[in-house]
Every structure is written in structure tokens, then in C-alpha cells.
Image: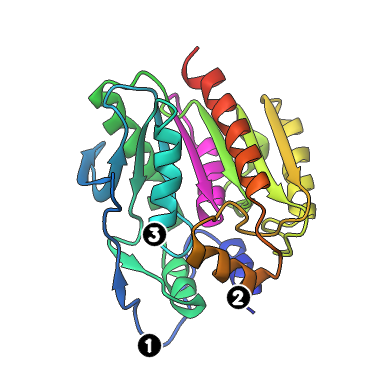
Amino acid sequence: RGAAATAARVRAGPRVGLGGVRRLASATSKAAEGMEAITVSAAGKTFPAYVCGEKGAPAVVVLQEWWGVTEQVQKQAQRIAGAGYRCLVPDFYKGKLGLDVEEASHLMGALNFPEAVSEIKAAATFLSDEGSRACGVTGFCMGGALSLACAVKAEGDIVCAAPFYGVPNKAYFDCSTIKIPVQAHFGKLDALAGFSDPEAAAALRKALQSAGCRHEIFMYDGVAHGFMNDLPDMIEKKKAMFGAEHSQEAVDLAFSRLLAFFATHLRS
């Protein structure tokens, strides 16, 4: 039920109201060790975010899953920063966290996708103002779909995109119009139909071929949705939701490909 809800919420469009009165998430995001909580003010937008890495280094905007800005996504940002990048994680939920599927579904369903894309672009402006000469974007699940949505709307602010298991609604973000390089990652056992399953990956490949942009799509054996999550609580959560076992080999391989992609497009 959780997997189906994830795909349905994102496919439904940029803003999906669930209707009725629902309780809000009962936890708040906070900076993980090694991260700094900041307020971004740029391009007419103001929002909370978390940063790591050296100011002025090539930059990457790292986008959350539907749970919110968890310790997991901050650790993923730190791994990228450890390779010599300045990373910024926008907090789309403004401090809220989804503790379970119902809460996460509510938060993602209330998210305005075009506004989130505007915040990503504002984050790129902020990083440029800090001294970064190039900025890419990556994200996971909902953040993967938002990475591609941002690529559709890129205007020189974002120079490359690397989505993980998430494709946006074509009615609002047509990936066949993308002009910047894309590197996408999917699990072969992902069952979120139309969002991140192998058929969705194949449709994305076709769209990017039509777009004519530089692209590569990697499919990983033996893993399902959320396969990049490697903290103990998130491993248990993805096992419960999607059934597949954790593969650290897949995580490490995907990170090696991701960092090679960023080295090509953010350091050249």
C-alpha cells in the first residue's frame, strides 16, 4: 500500500490535495553531525536548508525523499561533499518529517512541485553567490522526480541532473525537452508502476533519446525502490515497504558512477 501511494501521489501532479483533516507529522528535521542549518535567501525565495562541504567548490543540490530531510539524505549529501563538493539540501517540508507512510504521503501530497523547483533554482543561485562556478542536482524518490523536473526547467543555473528512482508527471514536466546531461539510477525490482519501475525507466530513456541530451540510465540487479538508503533504520523501512534486501555493493557502485558524472560536468 505504501509503494502504491508513493507512485500515485507523484503521478497525480505538482500539487495533490488529499482532502479531509489529517494529522501532521509529529517530528521535525534537524542538522545531522557535520551539517549546518541555514536559511537560503536568493532569487526572491527564502527557505531553510542544510549545507556541507567547502564554500566555492563545485556545487550539488541534494533532494530529499518523501520522508523529509532525514539523517539519511544528509549523510548522502556528506558523502558527495567528501569528494570535493559544496552540497545544499533544501527543506521542502519546512522542518516537518514523515514518520510513517501516512504522514509522508500527506506531506508529499501537499507539496507544490513547481514551487519546489523554484526553490531548487534559488538554491543554485545561492551557491553561485557563495562562489561555486557550476551546480548540479541529485535526489532520491520524490527528490529524483524533482531532479528531472528541475532539469526540464534548467536555464543555465543547473548544468546536470542525476535522479534516483523517480520520474515526474509528464503533463507538467516533459523530460523529452531536457537539454542538460542526465544520469539516472533505478532498481530492477522496483515495483512503483509509472514512477520508478523498469517500465518508467524505459520511458525515461525514450524521452531523453527524443530530447537529444547526453544521458545514461543504470539499472541495478536485486534491489528495489530506495536502494540507496543505507542507515539501519532506513534499511529496515525499505525492507518492510518493498521487500528487497539491502545491497551495499549497489550503493557503492551507484555513488562511484554519480561522482564520476559530477566530475565530468561540474569540474570541466
Write down the residue under mark 2.
2
Which label lies toward us, 3 or 1? 3
Tag 3: Cα neighbours inside 10 Å, few (<14), some, or many (≥20)? many
Report the number of numbered marks.
3
> Mark 3 = which residue?
70
| Foreground pick, 32 / 186 | 32
Q: Name the residue under label 1.
A: 21
- Rendered position, 112 above or below 160: below
Is 59 a magenta residue?
no
List x then y, in percent, for residue 222.
77, 55
Please give the name of the residue rendered at 55% of the width and 70% of the height, measured from the top-left corner. 237
Tell me the SS state at disc 3: loop
In the rendered image, which quarter contains the N terminus?
Answer: bottom right
Q: How far apart are marks 3 and 1 (CA)?
A: 25 Å
User: How many C-alpha atoms fall within 10 Å of the one at disc 2: few (<14), some, or many (≥20)?
Assistant: some
> Which residues fall within the magenta stretch?
136-156
Task: Give the x, y percent position of residue 267.
Answer: 47, 16
